[in-house]
Image (cartoon, rainbow, N blue to C red):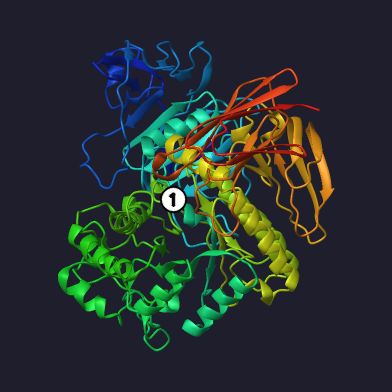
Amino acid sequence: MKFTDGYWRKRDGLTVLHPQHFQDSLVGVDSLTVYAATKRVQDRGDTLDAALLTVRLSSPAPDVIRVTLSHFDGGRPRLPNFELASSPVDLSVGADSLTSGSLTAAVRTGEEWGLDFLDPSGRRITGSGWKGAGIVSGDSGHFIHEQLDLGVGEVVYGLGERFGPLVKNGQTIDIWNEDGGTSSEQAYKNVPFYLTSGGYGVLVDHPGRVSFEVASEMVTRTQFSVAGQSLSYLVIYGPTPADVLRKYTALSGRPALPPAWSFGLWLTTSFTTSYDEETVNSFIDGMAERDLPLSVFHFDTFWMREFNWCDFEWDSRVFPDPPGMLKRLAGKGLKTCLWINPYIAQRSPLFAEGRDKGYLVRTVDGDVWQWDRWQAGMGLVDFTNPEACAWYAAKLRALVEMGVGAFKSDFGERIPVEGIVWHDGSDPERMHNYYTQIYNQVVFDVLKEARGEGEAVLFARSATVGGQKFPVHWGGDNTGNFASMAESLRGGLSLMSSGFGFWSHDIGGFEGLPDPAVFKRWIAFGLLSSHSRLHGSKSYRVPWNFDEEAVDVLRFFTHLKYRLMPYLFGAAREAHFTGLPVMRPMPVAFPDDPAAAYLDRQYMLGGDLLVAPVFSAEGEVSYYVPEGRWTHYLTGEVVTGPGWVRETHDFSSVPLLVRPGAVIPVGARQDRPDYDFRDGVTLRLFEPSADRTAVVVPGPSGADTVFTVTRSGSEVRIGRSGEALPWRVQLGDEVVSLDADQDSCTLTLG
């Protein structure tokens, strides 16, 4: 939201008061409260008929400082609020500064107002200066805004899953969940958190609409504003982007660890296609006959009867024996997933029950809120009512007991604001974005309670701050063309910059029938994502519907992913424990390389694999290689960076490069993603460095095996600590097989 008309003037109809100078302060045990006058106070008369801005500084965790700007403090508390953790902090509080760990907030006490954020050396990393903070009033209401300075060349990332440019500079962004597809400025997953190349991140602690002007209204500042009388934000010191993400997710929640089987290939019925058990079996059997190992089969919306979504009852006309069918699918080694949403259509038998028991959102007149968009006469489950949560969860629990392994928790964005009342009195504007958090937690908890820790997984579309705790999220409704493939990647990288650890997308695009070339190129991108799903709208996504080469391409990349599972699951555990995403934007992975700042057509898969999807039928691709000798994983060719590379790839190839010095653990199986990764693992060594490298290969129930690689001159020694199982080492073309009782080996560099 813009409040100015150019640099000097405010927009017509607006009055904006800015802090002019420090008035005085109040030092608390764990906080500093500063009072800033909004006009020059030169004598006692100047204290009359003037607003005072209250600035409160505190800290919930080391290296994190909260700033709360308030005009009027008389408002009632409003729900909901983000769930943010706190941890012990060694604070230093003075009359004009507060220090938390390595971050200091210093208030200028001279003639000009200023709030500066300083790193341990005293260097200013950002801050709010002249006309930075503002109290806004006008016909459209009352707002508070803050502006934090951007340095020369400083760029901004994050703010949720956004499908435009990865770098947010120059953009106006409203944090407001919408069902807008992947080709618009709207977003399913809005997160009022950004990080910058300047060594810090910022979370605006407001679950409702937050308007960002990122180097747009003021090209040297990031502005954020909310409606109301107060604004609270947290500055998180890095100094690296990875450090910022670690500290941000320590506050907002780390991703749960998805089960290993969820990293396998998912196939769906598609959306409005015609299907029954015979159709499902033909797809599953066709995949098995072609050596295309599936992990999960997903039933989309029409597993329920039309006009009944949701009643959580199988449509008996096409699925007469759901328990038997699920048992038969499990016998084929498959997990099953069902589509759900938080809406109850009027024809659903659950509608009357939810209406009578007060489980559906009400209007201010006491009626059930309803509309015809999506489902005829649908109501909305009121998840602020604990009884409604238990009611909804019971319906899901019955399906889990029947044999369902996961839920696609769709929608959650179309949440009304006007004329409604929530059970717990939540503010409708604040609940609009936050609704998805409660919805997905209810669904996730059903699976976790039934299946156990580490066995719960969703396929969720909407999210807000903290949504990363309930993985996996997918990119929503994209289209079957190369442009949409690229925008999907940008959305994923933007989400990964916002604290989310796992992400997926519809391979081949959701809308339209993709050209075979698009489908085959998308397969490589999809299988080199954390989670991989074949899904469409009006057409099936089985590969033989495109051509026989698509079958071969899918087989190749599915086998490749399953062999890489020891490495990928290690990256997944890192996301779970540290908050670093499995798919990492290049600026996060290489913050000191200025060439990486704007890269949005490639990414790091874990810490050591660079992926550059091919966005052309002909196979032409350009990508950037950071410093060092990188090795093509599929061919062994070496590329030396830094620099740009232009290549041409066939459909069974993609730029997949290994970082110099990396050790990639490769599994012994390619028929499934969930197996004992330690048994028969091959350690592939690439450009061994003089540094000692430790690689953890995850084992069942935490029984990990740790390998260490040490180079001395031309000798490379590999040691093992863990259960005695056979293993191998590969360096270039040389492969050494070791028996279960051999704990070490030594190779000589050629």
Mark 1 nearby-residue class (10 Å; few <14, some 14–19, many ≥20) = many
Picture coordinates of residue 40, whole percent (x, y): 38, 18
- The quarter of the picture where residue 184 lies is bottom right
Q: How many marks?
A: 1
- Residue 425: name its quadrant: bottom left
Residue lying at the far left in this picture: please name it.
357
The location of residue 444, given as percent across then percent down, is: 34, 55
* Side (left or right) of 526 relative to 572: right
Q: Residue furthest bottom?
A: 317
Give whichever of 181, 524 is nearer the camera: 524
Q: Tag 1's secondary structure?
A: loop
- Amino acid beneath label 1: Pro
Residue 482, image x, y percentages:
71, 60
Q: Is residue 300 visible?
A: yes
Residue at horizontal 72%, vertical 22%? 715
Q: Nearer the viewer, residue 530 or 160?
A: 530
Give the side of residue 512 with respect to residue 227, left or right: right
In this rendering, would 608 be left or right of 88?
right
Q: Position of residue 121 (x, y in %)?
A: 51, 10
Which residue position holds label 1? 258
Give the answer, above or below, for where 750 lies relative to 550. Answer: above
Q: Is residue 68 placed above or below 187 in the rendered structure?
A: above
Please say if 301 is above or below 529: below
